[in-house]
Amino acid sequence: MISRRTLMASGVALAAAPAFAQDDPFSRLQTGTGEPKRAVPGYATIAFRRPDETATFAKAGGYAIAGPTGRIMRLDSPMRIASISKLVAAIGFMSLQEQGRVGLDEDVSELLRFPLRHPLFPDVPITPRMLLSHTSGLRDGPSYPVGLGRKLADALTPGGKQWDNGAWFGPASERPGEWFAYANVNFAVIAELIERMTGERFDLFMARRVFKPLGLECGYNWSGVPQRLRNYAAALYRKAPDEDGPWDAKGPWLPQFDAAVPAAPEILVTRSPEGETLRLAPDEYDGGNGFVFSPQGGLRASARDLEVFARLLAGGGQVDTVRILKSETVALMAQPIWTYTPARPNGEAYGGMILAYGLGCQILTDSGGDSLFPGCAGWIGHAGDAYGLVSGLWVQPTTGRGMTYLVNGLAAPLAELRERSKFTVVEEQIAGVLATA
């Protein structure tokens, strides 16, 4: 287990104020004054200059739970971190790859125990490299996701109960291995591959192989998160019923997710085929559906947890004396598998926010849409947005600098908060402070 020495910040950093003080570096994030559409319910942020040194900036502010009976945000408040979950899942998968248990260019069908083929390209094997880099040709189908009680094969094989007439795959112009299309289903397949290789549930494998050695108590869909941390959990908020709904910047924060957290040790699974929210019994899941533990976005983790993952990447796969990955493996993850070519478009680029991608790892190019902060070219990590939350974990491999931030709600839709880049102005402001801290 790692020492907490390098992870401790000053006592001030642990203090969280329910309002944003005027001398706060994030003073623009006002709650109801100044620019109302930039308001946020709460945030937690950490930055460090080297992976083996104390954090240079660590602050939480605002609310984890809004309202008169709410609670303040803390650096150890767990919340649903969205797509940073993919980067963490990739760390677990790559630990198996470097053991030689699976090849990056291996056909995954045999491991999955069902034939995974793009119906328009039946002779092209789909590989872990394609899945991890979103170049597999897979898409999130109309009946996304595949819930508890069904198999992943029900969506990805002809005749399955959720085949959706093949809509889980891209068109004929997007040959697997050549076209980037960001899709959550890729990481459901990655989770299922982990289960097939290890004979272990995805959430339990990640806890055993990654979280516990690092001294962390985070978990996918609340799996393994103790009650004392669930008591600090943060809900996710918008000021509209959903991303496309009518919103009022001066209106109340409307909870979107985790307003109520299951009591430990219960696990909140994706959902049943009928759309219900279910709580998983310990022996209820026996494999075959990588969506169940939401590897694509369902990790419940705090800013403190994300700090450890950032230090892991900045330290070449090691935090203090604990090594999870070889340095060569981290370097491989950070190497672009796909880079956007404007002259000859070769992907959807997530609206322009993703311009280069490795193995479960986004690479910033600082060229327009992905210019999170000035000079961000070459930083690696992942962004996340879902249910009002925006999040980021970013590391500069050449210097060992790192940052992470979690914002548990936005007052306006994403499109109205984009000005300089395809990130929100809230993220740009926070990352700009952290990059120079």
Image (spheres, helix red, strand yellow):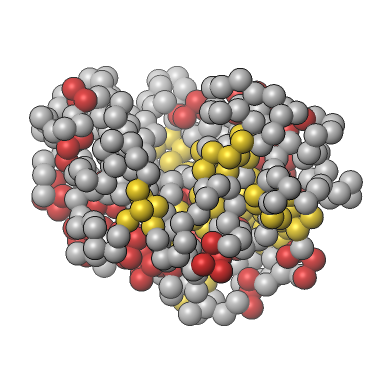
In the picture shown, does residue 102 fall above or below 358? below
143 or 82, nearer to the observer: 143
Q: Position of residue 33 (x, y in %)?
A: 84, 33
Give the side of residue 38 with respect to residue 177, left or right.
right
Q: Residue 159 placed where, x, y %?
A: 10, 30
Answer left or right for 156 relative to 252. Answer: left
Which quarter of the image is occupied by the C terminus? bottom right
Image: 40 above or below 322: above
- Nearer to us in this view, 46 or 78: 78
> What residue is drawn where x is 80% and y is 34%?
32
In percent of the image, x 80 and y 39: which residue is there? 30
> Which of the pair 70/344 is nearer the observer?
70
In the current view of this chain or complex, which residue is farthest to the front? 69
**Image quadrant of residue 119?**
top left
Specify whether 427 is left or right of 356: right
Task: Locate residue 131, reporting x and y percent.
Answer: 30, 43
Q: What residue lies at 45% left-to-right and 54% top-to-bottom?
A: 299
Q: Position of residue 69 (x, y in %)?
A: 70, 51
